[in-house]
């Protein structure tokens, strides 16, 4: 998947709720930050926060989540490409 991402704030790539099993795999752009944000508003918390460095980095959600968002932060407007994996036949 590819999406144009504007700089300056955490941008949501995908949202999941309930029972979920999803993995996103990122490579570029170097310096972009990725994370999983659980919960709502100021009651939320971050997990799996990483910075892309050119090697494969992944975010995974597996199991019961109330509400979670897979997010990215970039310093300049850019096109972000990632691979999405879900279990199934």
Image (cartoon, rainbow, N blue to C red):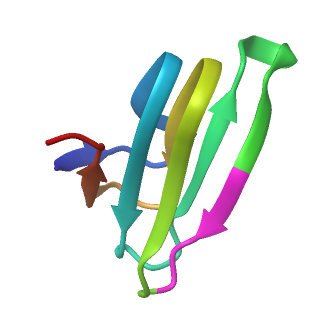
The image shows a total of numbered marks equal to 0
- What is the span of residues highlighted in magenta in the rendered image? 48-53
Of the pair 64 and 1, the residue shown nearer to us: 64
Q: Is residue 1 magenta?
A: no
User: Which residue is situated farthest in the front direction here?
Assistant: 89
Residue 61 image-quadrant placement = top right
Q: Is residue 50 magenta?
A: yes
Identify the main secondary structure in magenta: strand
Residue at figure coordinates x 37%, y 63% from the top left: 25
Instruction: Say left or right for 85 vs 55.
Output: left
Residue 8 image-quadrant placement = top right
Q: In x, y percent, where is residue 32?
A: 50, 66
Depicted 1 relative to depicted 62: above or below: below
Depicted 54 relative to depicted 4: above or below: below
Instruction: Say left or right for 47 vs 69.
Output: right
Depicted 59 relative to depicted 63: above or below: below
Residue at figure coordinates x 42%, y 60% from the top left: 76
Of the pair 39 and 77, the residue shown nearer to us: 39
Instruction: Say left or right for 70 vs 49.
Output: left
Q: In x, y percent, where is residue 35?
A: 61, 49
Q: In x, y percent, where is residue 3?
A: 21, 45
Residue at figure coordinates x 23%, y 46% from the top left: 4
Of the pair 64 and 38, the residue shown nearer to us: 64
Give the position of the C terminus as an image quadrant: top left
Q: In x, y percent, where is residue 57?
A: 48, 72
Depicted 45 relative to depicted 56: above or below: above
């Amino acid at each position: 998947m590819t999406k144009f991402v504007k700089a300056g704030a955490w941008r949501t790539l995908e949202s999941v709720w309930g029972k979920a099993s999803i993995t996103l795999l990122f490579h570029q752009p170097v310096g972009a930050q990725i994370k999983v944000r659980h919960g709502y508003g100021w009651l939320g918390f971050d997990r799996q926060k990483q910075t892309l460095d050119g090697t494969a980095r992944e975010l995974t959600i597996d199991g019961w989540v109330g509400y979670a968002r897979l997010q990215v932060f970039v310093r300049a407007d850019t096109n972000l490409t990632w691979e999405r994996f879900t279990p199934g036949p």
